Image (cartoon, rainbow, N blue to C red):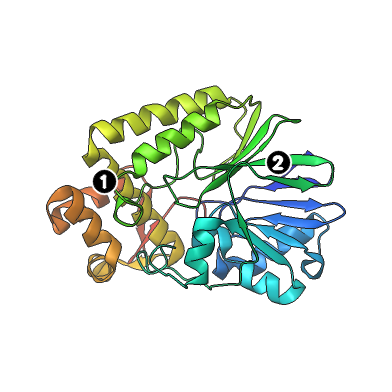
Amino acid sequence: MISQIRPNFFFIERGWLNANHFVFNGKQRILIDTGYVSDFEETRGWIEAVGVDLKSVDLIINTHSHCDHVGGNKRIREISGCWISIHRLDKQSIDLRDDWSTWYRFYDQEAEFFPVDDALEGGEMVYLDDLELRIIHTPGHARGGIALYCPKERFLISSDALWDGDLGVLNTIVEGKEAPILAMESLKKIRSWDLRTIYPGHGGIISDPEAAIRKCEEKLKSFINNPKKLGKDHLKKILIWVLLMKRGYRADDFFGYLLRVPWFKAVVDAYFEGRYQELFSNLLEELLARNIIFIQDGCYQTSVKS
């Protein structure tokens, strides 16, 4: 779904596999985040729908280096020769082709590395013609996560630091045990700005920022006070995301697949003393009962929009 933020600036709401992204069609053609690599042609279609040919793209700004936000970078760069900007910490990971810090290997993701031209820092400004956006460093979900705040229009591009009452998965194995504390500090930064509208990394436009922030704060407090809740949230979110990424998975091998990739065992070891079968069975029972997961033609599928 496409929404116009202001003349020449568009918000494109995708699903939960592909991150939302933004297209600015002014003196420069600027993209903010580029979706998941396997859906590149769909991403191209959305960008062209607001009048931007990929050959004309001048700049990509990434809110962080996870594969659902940078999947189109390499191909758009090859087509257009555009400049790519990302936070300093994520530029380091990309430059080193660090497939662990970027989460690619941890979650068995499909991803392509790409050249980065500019390292962003919190407090810097970026300009979309006369529109000024302030970069806010928002670690927690991602060490190099940024949000972009527009003082003039009082809107925030929050990426995965804040959804509508939730946030992106907190991966304490890769990001460190301090991830929920950092996420709370990032949320406090967001609260400090005068906000009318928030455009999140996944999900629809947030028209009540205070309510969304308050709900997210409550969730983070519960994670900090009860780490097992954080562990379960991690397992559920990524279990669903894997089914989106893999377009479903054979039911007779799904548990076996989870034992072969790093993330599942690492999270269960960290929070649930290695009870792999028990956690898998409990999660599947819950998600099937809630119709978030279903079985079709011998495969687990998810009802969550991709």
| Residue in the picture at 57% in, 62% down | 70
Can I make out residue 65 in this image? no
Mark 2: amino acid: Leu
Image vertical order of residue 18 relative to residue 224, above or below:
below
Location of mark 1 (residue): 231
Of the image marks 1 and 2, the number of the one nearer the N terminus: 2
| Residue in the picture at 17% in, 55% down | 269
The answer to whether residue 127 is left or right of residue 68 is right
From the viewer's side, name the closer residue of 179 and 214.
179
Image vertical order of residue 127 relative to residue 102, above or below:
above
Residue 117 x %, y %: 65, 66
Q: CA distance from mark 1 to mark 2?
A: 34 Å
Image vertical order of residue 164 relative to residue 111, above or below:
above
| Secondary element at tag 1 | helix
The answer to whether residue 58 is left or right of residue 115 is right
| Residue 133 numbered mark, or none | 2
Q: Classify mark 1: residues with Cα within 10 Å, few (<14), some (14-19) or many (20+).
A: many
